[in-house]
Image (cartoon, helix red, strand yellow):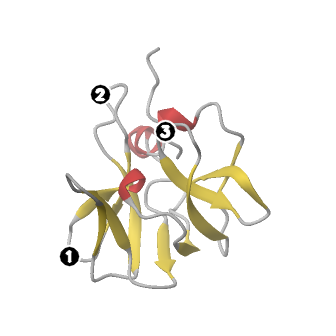
Amino acid sequence: MCDYSLQNVKSRAAKVGDELTTTNFGAGTRGFAAPEDASMAVCVLPGTELSFAREIMVAEQRILFDAARATGHVTAIFRQVDKEIPHRHHDALEFPDGQMVLLTSLCEGQHATVLQLPAQPVTAKEVEEQTRAAFVG
């Protein structure tokens, strides 16, 4: 979905085939921007499969400079983590090796394609897993 910090940014749901760009929305977080409007966040459901144009890069802050590290992957599955903890980033990517990285940690300007959306939820547990993390203000 979209992290709590993007609740005041206009948004829409992801669609198969969307060409997304990692963007800093100026709200204290990075997320996916829509191709038709760079100021629109695209909310992705947990379980959505993504393919990146190049190796996925993660931003790292160092004491004297900013750096980036390569993940070794070009595909990922969107997940949400720590949904029960308010005021924390929940949007994450899971790589084929099981490593998870918060979406807000990705370097800006990376291009990803939505390959596949998750199956529609059938059980109450599946509905809960695809529900946006609650914001407690």
The residue type indicated by label 2 comes to: Ile
Tell me the quarter of the picture where residue 123 sits: top left
Q: Earlier in the sequence, mark 2 or mark 1?
A: 2
In the rendered view, tell whether residue 71 sits above or below residue 37. Answer: below
Crowdedness of circle 2 by 10 Å Cα count: few (<14), some, many (20+)?
few
Question: Viewed as shown, does residue 132 lie left or right of 90?
Answer: right
Q: Earlier in the sequence, mark 3 or mark 1?
A: 1
Q: Earlier in the sequence, mark 2 or mark 3?
A: 2
Question: Viewed as shown, does residue 92 lie left or right of 130?
Answer: left
The residue type indicated by label 1 comes to: Asp
**Which SS class for mark 3?**
loop
Q: How far is disc 2 from disc 1 in space, using C-alphas? A: 25 Å
Residue 81 seen in this snapshot: yes
Residue under label 2, please give it: 85
Q: How far is disc 2 from disc 3 in space, using C-alphas? A: 14 Å
**Which SS class for mark 2?**
loop
**Which SS class for mark 1?**
loop
Residue under label 1, please give it: 97
The residue under the point 59% across, 46% down is: 25
Residue under label 3, please give it: 131
Question: Viewed as shown, does residue 30 lie left or right of 74?
Answer: right
In the rendered view, tell whether residue 3 sits above or below residue 21. Answer: above
Residue 14 in the image: x percent, y percent? 64, 59
The residue under the point 40% across, 79% down is: 75
Q: List the single residue furthest toward the top.
A: 137
Q: How far is disc 3 from disc 1 in space, using C-alphas? A: 25 Å
The residue under the point 57% across, 41% down is: 26
Residue 67 in the image: x percent, y percent? 29, 66
Tell me the quarter of the picture where residue 47 sits: bottom left
Residue 41 in the image: x percent, y percent? 64, 50
Crowdedness of circle 3 by 10 Å Cα count: few (<14), some, many (20+)?
some
